[in-house]
Amino acid sequence: MVLQYLIIRTQWDNILKFAMPASSLCDAHNNCAEKCFKYIKQDDWVTSGKLGSREAVLVFRTNILNPKTRKTLLETTPEQVKLKNVEATSTQSGVVLEKAMSSAICKTNATIGQAYVSVEKSPNSNDLRNPVKKLHGSFSSCDTSVSSDGDETVQYNEKKPRVQQKNRNAAIVEIEVNLNKESGYNSIPATQFNTGSNTSEEDQEASSEEDKECGINMPAHQLQITYKFIQTETKLLRKIFNVHGLTEVQGESNFNLLWTGVHMKLDTLRNLALYQRVNHFPRSYELTRKDRLYKNIERMQHLRGMKHFDIVPQSFILPLESRDLLFAHNKHRGPWIVKPAASSRGRGIFIVNSPDQIPQDEQVLVSKYIVDPLCIDGHKCDLRVYVLVTSFDPLIIYLYEEGIVRLATVRYDRNADNLWNPCMHLCNYSINKYHSDYIRSSDAQDEDVGHKWTLSALLRHLKLQGCDTHLLMLNIEDLIIKAVLACAQTIISACRMFVPNANNCFELYGFDILIDNTLKPWLLEVNLSPSMGVDSPLDTKVKACLVTDLLTCVGIPAFSPEMRSHYNSKSSQIRSSSCHRQVDTTESGIAIRSTKTKKKTFGLIQLTQEEQRILRSARLQYSRRGGFVRIFPTDDTMQRYGHFLDSANGIPISTPNVQGQTFQTLVTQHNYNQMLHSNLYCLGSRSLKDDNCQENRIRQYERALETDSEIPFLKKQIVEKCEEEGRRLRKQLLKKIGSGSTLTHFQARQTFSLYLESVLRRLTQDPKDSHEKIILKFLNRYGGGVKPPVLFRNTLNVSKARSAMVAKLLGDFLELYKRDTEAYVDSFDHFGMIPTSAYSLFLIHAQESDLEAVLTHHTNVTGIMPFLYNRCGLSVPPTPPIPSGLHGFLRALPAMVSASGFSRDVSKYDGYFKSCDKNLEDVHDISLRSRSTRDFK
Ligand code: ADP
């Protein structure tokens, strides 16, 4: 055994010797490594390679989010024998093997052409033995084999045991050996796990200062790793980045990680250096725009047969395909669900019984409404699952083990009279959260409580009812893979044109799936930037685990500033010589020369440097996958999907004329999908237990997500208001306005959005019919992307559902409005304007009535409406006089918007607005009578 180990180690050292970097870079690496070795326990935070090596990437964990477990986490646990970084440099791998040899139960299997070591845990520590909890600690690295050149290929296959109740994030690419107590292993005390301790969540959430302080000790901080946000929800992400030591940069500064909520600019993509990561692929809209997605899948239905791609409800893009829709309607009848092509979060969606109820003036996607959805306790539900694509060629897709099930608040009823009710037919959280019957679970452990469940809880629930959850999950995997295959071709060609390095892009997609009552999953849409907002402890748990696992799996290179500047200059040289993707030869390791032996042992064809890099990178990534389940490739990928790929280059083919032609002429001949699949699953690897097999994947989906410490719920910060102070400041302000001072655009917009926020809160707590009508009238006139989502049939009676819908519309409006307000930020004190600091203080303490008083007075005195119009705005309507008194401003609101956009939508809300108009006329009457503003002084 020792002899075999020595052979393996020598081979390993040789491989790595060949793989050494170019000398210029070596210095940078060594400097960095020297510096970084000073860090305490840096090994815990860096994996896949020794710090200073090009493969080293940062590790992200959830338990560091909890200030109480931070301390423990940063201390060593002597009882545990942990061996880290198995994929590291020669010395490290030597140590790994040495320890593995001495204390683990090792299986060494060396033949002339093949040697692999597998370290196995004792049989009673099976990671899958607990059927209820998701036990992944787990960056299991059973697939981290490295093939080498020479006469022998070393396949190092380490089996990473999953330990019951194992610290989810504590072990990164590690081998825990000798799991039985006699050999010194102590299981982690149960108290460390999230067993629902009584600690208040508020106590646990650290301030951002504390987060940053924690970050200072992390390797990422020392390495000056930076991140940048563009138009994205940031609270959870920022917290995770900060505690891990990453620093936020803005503007033109260089970054290591760019996280944007919108599509990438091609220029940004083109200029990416080797170490930079961005969270989108170019042309991802092929998947994430509802109309594009449908067209891509429809094309596959024609090309490959409906039976293979019957994964989306039949849809039509209007007005272009109105005739086809009519034809389909005459054949099958409605109902139909109408969705604006590029919208999300239920915005603008409504359901109709017949196509003549659909307005013809804008582009919408009309889909067959699935009338028999799966219901939980009578409530319609749908799924949000998280899909990570780390590469399109070869295609590598992961599905996160946990997803979110969203339930509609109102019990489902097929009756057509109820089609207007969004809280019965749409499951979006953003719609249902405003319903007064909506129940939020208040404990992260409650996974099947209220209107948001976890995927694993749903699967367990269905299983108890005798449903075939195994088949359901396989069908969901299949649906995801097919949707990606349908769109991949365009994305691959965009990557070739615009992305300079293979690992620059990754993407987390939010797949929305509806399951019907026969358990068939239907793809509704794919979200470009799935929400990372957290509104409950359960949400926080799932999303924090998702983000940390995502970042570790994707791998943010742990490069030092020296290494980065080396690659910055290198990529600018490359850019000046070619715009196409470059293969970094220094990164690729050595070429496999001796095909003879390989053929003899595995039937391998010679791997190019790029292929070796891809293979190695895929294996390392798999070893860091945490809670991500790789669904492509798997062992049966080629059997199931091989015929959708071009036989020569492996690219998924979705256009008939391109097959075997255009693509091949554009790119060098290779077939990365085939190569990866054969190396992972066909060549000798088959003899090893495949931990990615169907059974294991399904079991992983069914287990509850377990964390080793509570993840603090990131609540919105609520400022303590002082009513008296608010009133005092309001008096001062009104005086100032009366004597000629004005609000800046920014101040006016801030006031208006805070005011509407108060109205929104009031509407959800104590719905008022008349106020809802006013808000609707205002929003309908205002237009600008905020449209009522349903027909208002039968809604003249006040109902909780209608209140919820109005609140949702106002919420949507506010979101867009606040985003626009950012463009007006102005912290200078201008002459004749209200001083910024005094105004900010007022905003902190102001109640709804204070805000209303200021807005009213300012509008009446100045005669302008800076909260709605800017200086150079066209078609600004005359400023209406605002009646004094409670809610006067609110009642005058619709009159502040020009009625030009009104006619277009009026037919939809006919009956409803007749009563509304009467109110509005009253407002005009009142306002003409009372121009006085005295009451507010
Ligand atoms: P959005 O991006 O605006 O959320 P979705 O396509 O996800 O739009 O649909 C919103 C909601 O509408 C979903 O939660 C689902 O419950 C419902 N829905 C969408 N399409 C259909 C359909 N074809 N049949 C039945 N319900 C649907």
Image (cartoon, helix red, strand yellow):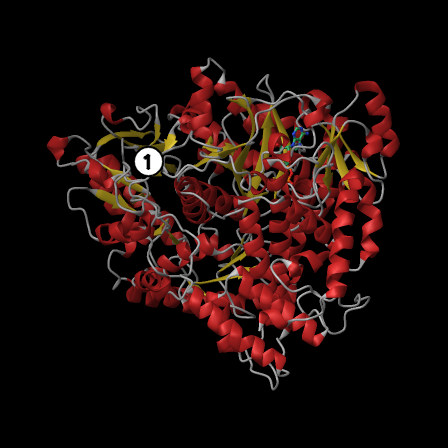
Left or right? Give the position of 897 relative to 160: right
Q: Position of residue 564 (x, y in %)?
A: 46, 66
How many residues crowd mark 1 within 10 Å: few (<14), some (14–19), many (20+)? many
The C terminus, quarter of image: bottom right
Q: Is residue 291 above or below residue 881?
A: above
Of residues 260 and 691, the one nearer the viewer is: 260
Q: Position of residue 466 (x, y in %)?
A: 46, 13
Report if the beta carbon of the residue with label 1 is closer than 8 angstroms to ligand 1: no
Q: Amino acid at mark 1?
A: Glu
Q: Position of residue 298 (x, y in %)?
A: 74, 31
Q: Position of residue 259 (x, y in %)?
A: 53, 56
Of residues 276 and 280, the one nearer the viewer is: 280
Q: What SS does tag 1 mark?
A: loop
Spot the residue most to the left.
Answer: 182
The N terminus, quarter of image: top left
Spot the residue most to the right.
Answer: 323
- Tell me, yes or no, if residue 333 can be seen here: yes
Left or right? Give the position of 200 relative to 651: left
Which residue is under mark 1? 158
Going 41% across and 53% down the picture, which residue do you hit?
Answer: 55
Left or right? Give the position of 457 relative to 932: left
Of residues 586 and 567, the one nearer the viewer is: 567
Going 71% across and 42% down the picture, which residue do you hit?
Answer: 664
Q: Is residue 382 above or below residue 858?
A: above
